[in-house]
Image (tube, rainbow, N blue to C red):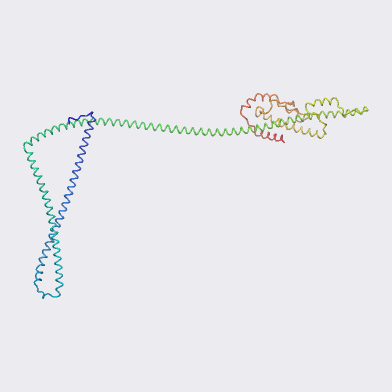
Amino acid sequence: MASLSFKDVNEEVEYWRRMAEEYKQAMEEAREELEDFQISSRELERELEIQLGQLEKQNEALILSNEKLISERDQLRPVKFTQMQRPASAYSEGDDGADSALQEEYDRLQNQLRNVQNERQRQTNEANVKLGRYNNEIELLEAENRELNMLLSLNNSSQNKKKDMKALEDLKQLLEQQEALHEKIDQTKAHHKQLDSEIRSLEKKICQKQQERAVQYKNEKEQQQRYIREMEQRNDDLERANRATVVSLEAFELQLNEAIEHNAILENELDEKRDLIVTVQRLKDETRDLQQELAVIRRQPASHSASLSNGHLTDVSAPSKHSTEIMVQTEPYSVPAPLLTPSTRIAALNMVNDALQKIGHLELKLSQLYRSYGAPPLSAPPNAFVPPALPGSPFGGTVNGGSGKLPSSHSYQRRNSLRSWTNGSLLMDHPAAQSEAHDSSLRVIE
């Protein structure tokens, strides 16, 4: 006991705790074995008592049956003896059946008697065997009793008393050691209680920390969920804005395409206008030539009448100086052509008037476009030339008083706004202006 050494108090406490658990377990096992033994012994004693009672009842029944058979045998023996002494002549035929029945009954009773005797002998043997076993057990118990008495006598001797004194001293020492161990155990229990209290306090702190962490984790999770929800909402807003931007961009592209198409139509109209301007210039040249020829023709009757009044004819076919000058002046514009008939000249004048009307409509459309765009289109020349109208034309002085050029303000505005025209945003025409331009272009093409 004193040789035990421990590293620390915890190890010692663990050792004594383990020993106490082992002793407690051994005590529980011994108690269970004792209870099982007591229960089994009670059951065995009960079974033996039941068997003994059954055997006693069977023995009594067999004794009664044996006595009954003995009495019957004693009763039948004189009858059988008298029958044996009766002479054979005395028997009648009616007595033969009775004798045979009596003989059978006698044989049956003898067999039953033998069976009962055998059963009684067997039961007697079994009882003797059990009695011998009981006697052996009694002898063993008596031997044990003698041994116990001898041990008691030995304990009463002086030598045993000395041994008892020594055993008592050893027992006292053991009790003292037990008390010391109990004190150590109490100290260890107190220390364990203190440790348990510290452990419980630490467990409480750990639980609080875990709860705080759980609350913090829950708050962080809720914040993350809110942040994710906000990000999803922002993403949805951005997607909606993107879709709206795409839709507006598509609408702007559609407007841009329409503006480009409209610009292309206007450029085509401007090209047609240039062609018409060239045609009108050519027609004006022809008209001027025709007017000059007409003036020459008008002067010819006057010279013809003067020649007639003087009494001689003048060669009309000879060109005069004025006609020659007219021919020279018209060379840069057209090639001299033969004189036209009046119907052809009237048709040409009508064509010129129609062309001038169309040009007037185009100029009106262009002025509206200049006002709507703020600058002339890209395809329009900086100094667009418009030939002057003929004298007496209903469209004389339409553009800049018939000087044949656009107003200087329009040309200056086009030159200054060319940069904003190429880089600025496009402006759509008013629907009425678009329909009017389309109708005027159709009239020009026709």
Furthest toward the front, the residue is: 88
Q: Position of residue 263 (x, y in %)?
A: 65, 31
When the figure is inspected, residue 246 is found, relative to residue 79, above or below; the finding is above
Please state if 90 lies on the left or on the right of 415 as rendered.
Answer: left
Q: Quadrant of the C terminus?
A: top right
Q: Quadrant of the N terminus?
A: top left
Quarter of the view holding residue 160 = top left
Q: Position of residue 359 (x, y in %)?
A: 73, 31
Quarter of the view holding residue 403 = top right
Quarter of the view holding residue 188 = top left
Judging depth in this view, the residue of 88 and 147 nearest the camera is 88
Furthest toward the left, the residue is: 158
When the figure is inspected, residue 83 is found, relative to residue 17, above or below; the finding is below
Tally of numbered tags = 0
Q: Position of residue 414 (x, y in %)?
A: 67, 25
Q: Position of residue 129 (x, y in %)?
A: 12, 53
